[in-house]
Image (cartoon, grey):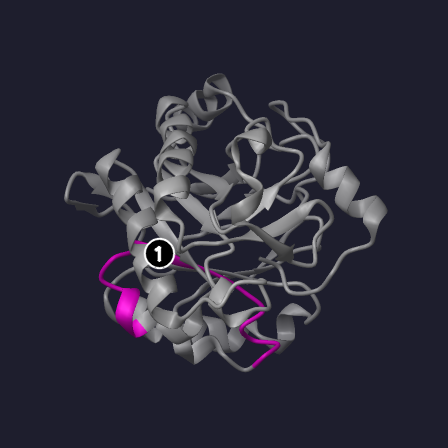
Amino acid sequence: MRRPVLPTALLLLLAGCTSAPGGDGGVGGEGGEGGDGGVRATAGHWRPTPGTAWQWQLSGRLDTSVDVPVYDIDGFDHDEATVAGLHDDGRKVICYVSTGAWEDFRPDADAFPKKVLGKGNGWEGERWLDIRATDVLEPLMAERLDMCRDKGFDAVEPDNMDGYKNDTGFPLTGDDQLRYNRLIAKLAHDRGMAVGLKNDLDQIPDLVDDFDFAVNEQCAQYGECADNRPFVDADKAVFHVEYELPTERFCADSRELRLSSMLKKYELDAWREAC
């Protein structure tokens, strides 16, 4: 979950964005960013290695021209043909879905009973989920990951994976979060997909063996990037973005830590400035 709260108009743009192959605003073709996707096969699924370049686009017309081996795109907004097209271009594709928060704009929103919906998480139309209620949430999340698998995605980026550190409206504990995060990892692995740990820095030492890569926002701004070292030490990629710092403020450290870092806009459109 991105930390700052965006203006409502921009959030509505994100919620209503459409997708299509091609694009008109990305930065592509940087030397040295192409490659084989940092491929490492383990337990039957892909695992990206440290330093693997990537593109993360969750809004706007999808720009497929960015010359990187990994794309992270919204699982609901894109179809099987889009994923297949990226595969034809030699990309690995990550399926973004929220697993820790309810979103009122998703097609399965009505399937979530009110008892599992907590406080707002700072984003328009989103509320924290009671992750203790696995009897309710497991089948719902299984359906979402079935969607990712059926569309051909290689991996999953499950968002809102650190509710226990936030004011959710539920008395969540660290142990609750560990159990839930491991459940999501298992659901992804059972479907043959890799899975990334989103933020949740404090629990990395406990979860690094359960996840195949990490996705981090703003660790440089908050002085937390070294907390991702267990993933790099395990030869697993850390896909990292900053929103407010210029690249000269974090890229040197990112290279030293072997993070896959870039500067993005908060709306996560096609624009990017990679390290």
Task: State the count of labels.
Answer: 1
Please, what is the three-letter code of the amino acid marked with disc 1?
Asn
Horizontally, residue 231 falls left or right of residue 272, namely left
Provide residue 250's location: percent of width, then percent of height: 57, 74
Q: Is residue 9 magenta?
A: no
Viewer-proximal residue among 48 and 101: 101
Provide residue 257's location: percent of width, then percent of height: 40, 74
Provide residue 162's location: percent of width, then percent of height: 47, 64
Classify mark 1: helix, strand or loop: helix
Quarter location, residue 106: top right
What crowding class fits label 1: few (fewer than 14 Cα within 10 Å), some (14-19), or many (20 or more)?
A: many
Q: Residue furthest top?
A: 81
On the image, numbered disc 1 is attached to which residue? 181
Quarter holding the C terminus? bottom right
Magenta-drawn segment: 205-222
Kindly identify the residue that appears in the image at 47 percent across and 22 percent down.
85
Could you tell me if residue 214 is visible in this image?
Answer: yes
